[in-house]
Image (cartoon, helix red, strand yellow):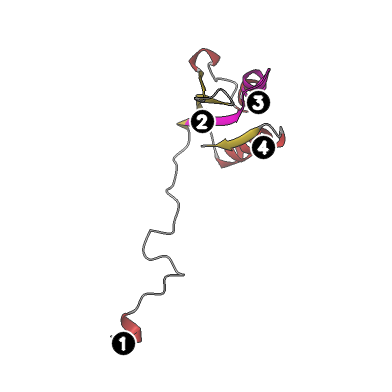
Amino acid sequence: MSDSSLRDLRKPSGDAGERPKIEFPCRYPLKIVGDADDGFHDEMIAIVEYHAPEFDRRQVQIVDSRNGRFQSLRVTITATGNEQLQALFADLKATGRVHMVL
């Protein structure tokens, strides 16, 4: 086997290393996970509403973890662009209450 037939695994091949392009505006689901404590979901919903004013809080799904230690909020917003999403993620992270956003 020659060196020319080996692929450099540090370099993405084809489209494998590229993120899929999102066409805005679009429906964008989010799952926000944090500690289950008083006011967690109210604070998260307020942040989401700030960045996506058309967001319908009646559509929020709140799921507690099996042992009740964590809580996840499942919401869907209309994303208008990368700037909006980056600002939303930054504000959620800045609370110090969010463990992850999917």
The reply to whether dot 3 and dot 2 touch (C-beta < 8 Å) is: no
The amino acid sitting under disc 4 is: Lys
Label 2, on which residue?
31
Label 4 sits on residue: 93
Q: Badge 3, how many Cα within 10 Å: few under 14, some, many 20+?
A: some
Mark 2 surroundings within 10 Å by alpha-carbon count, few (fewer than 14), some (14 through 19), many (20 or more): some
Residue 83 position by quadrant: top right
Residue 63 in magenta stretch? no
Dot 1 or dot 3: first in sequence order is 1
Residue 14's tag is: none
Is residue 92 at least partly visible in the picture? yes
Magenta stretch, residue numbers = 29-44
- Closer to us: mark 3 or mark 2? 2
Place of residue 73 in the rendered image (x, y in percent of width and height, measured from the top left): 54, 24
Q: SS of the residue at dot 2?
A: strand
Upstream in the sequence, badge 2 or badge 1? 1
Query: Foreground mark, 1 or 3?
Result: 1
Cα–Cα gap, marks 1 and 3: 56 Å
* Separation of marks 3 and 4 at Cα, in angstroms: 11 Å
Mark 1, residues whose alpha carbon is within 10 Å: few (<14), some, or many (≥20)? few
Identify the secondary structure beneath mark 3.
helix
Residues 34 and 22: in front is 34
Which residue is under mark 3?
A: 47
Q: Which of marks 1 and 4 precedes in the sequence?
A: 1
User: Which label belongs to residue 2?
Assistant: 1
Q: Earlier in the sequence, mark 3 or mark 4?
A: 3
Q: Which of these two is toward me, 21 or 44? A: 44
Rendered position, 25 above or below 9 = above
In space, the residues marked 3 and 2 are separated at their CA atoms by: 14 Å
* Whether residue 88 can be seen here: no
Cα distance, mark 2 to mark 1? Answer: 47 Å
